Image: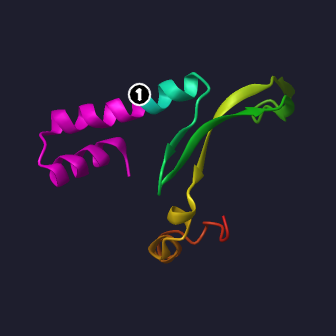
Amino acid sequence: MTRSELIKALAREMAFGKDRAARVVEVIFESIASALERGESVEIRGFGRFSVRMRRARQARNPKSGAIVDLPERVVPWFAASQALRKVERFSTSLEMKSPQIKKGL
């Protein structure tokens, strides 16, 4: 689902205009991003938890030139689905039908 599809669904479900639905989605995303920038986590019960994690420094390979590149330590956003979300039966069934490449057990 894309941002525009989310906006359309919100507008349809809540009988909002698209402009108002777009603003609601924007405020939610901005709030989550702001909290992550401050190093805080955002927990949405029954859905999951957004947080930041430190990714250690490592070496990588430039795919075009093949040269080894040193990547510094950095902070990356992280999402962990709640147990309730992971237990939803319909996800495993519908995802297997749509994309056989999805790894089971994740």
Image: magenta residue range: 1-30
The answer to whether one can see residue 103 in this image is: yes
Q: Residue at x 25, y 31 (%)?
A: 23
Quadrant of the frame with the C terminus: bottom right
Q: What is the secondary structure assignment of the residue under circle 1?
A: helix
Check if residue 75 falls in the magenta segment. no
Determine crowd level at label 1: few under 14, some 14-19, many 20+ residues with C-alpha closer than 10 A. Answer: few
Residue 36, relative to residue 84: is it above or below?
above
Q: Quadrant of residue 73?
A: top right
Residue found 24% across the figure and 52% down from its top: 9
Q: How is the image coloured?
A: rainbow
Place residue 69 in its image quadrant. top right
Q: 103 or 106, which is in the foreground?
A: 106
Give the side of residue 47 with respect to residue 63, left or right.
left
Which residue position is annotated with label 1? Answer: 30
Instruction: From the viewer's perspective, tell me whether residue 6 is left or right of residue 63.
Output: left
Judged by its main secondary structure, the magenta piece is helix
Question: Foreground residue, 73 or 62?
Answer: 73
Describe residue 78's horizontal placement relative to residue 28 as left or right: right
* Viewer can see residue 66: no
Residue at (56%, 46%) from the top-left corner? 49
The amino acid type found where label 1 is placed reads Glu
Q: Is residue 73 above or below residue 91?
A: above
Q: Quadrant of residue 56?
A: top right
State the image coordinates of residue 15 (x, y, percent, origin top left): 11, 48
Given residues 96 and 6, the one toward you in this image is 6
Q: Position of residue 101 (x, y in %)?
A: 61, 67
* Residue 67, position as x, y percentages in the image: 86, 28
Q: Position of residue 12 (x, y in %)?
A: 16, 52
- Label total for image: 1
Is residue 18 depicted above or below 5 in this figure? above
Q: Residue 17: within the magenta? A: yes
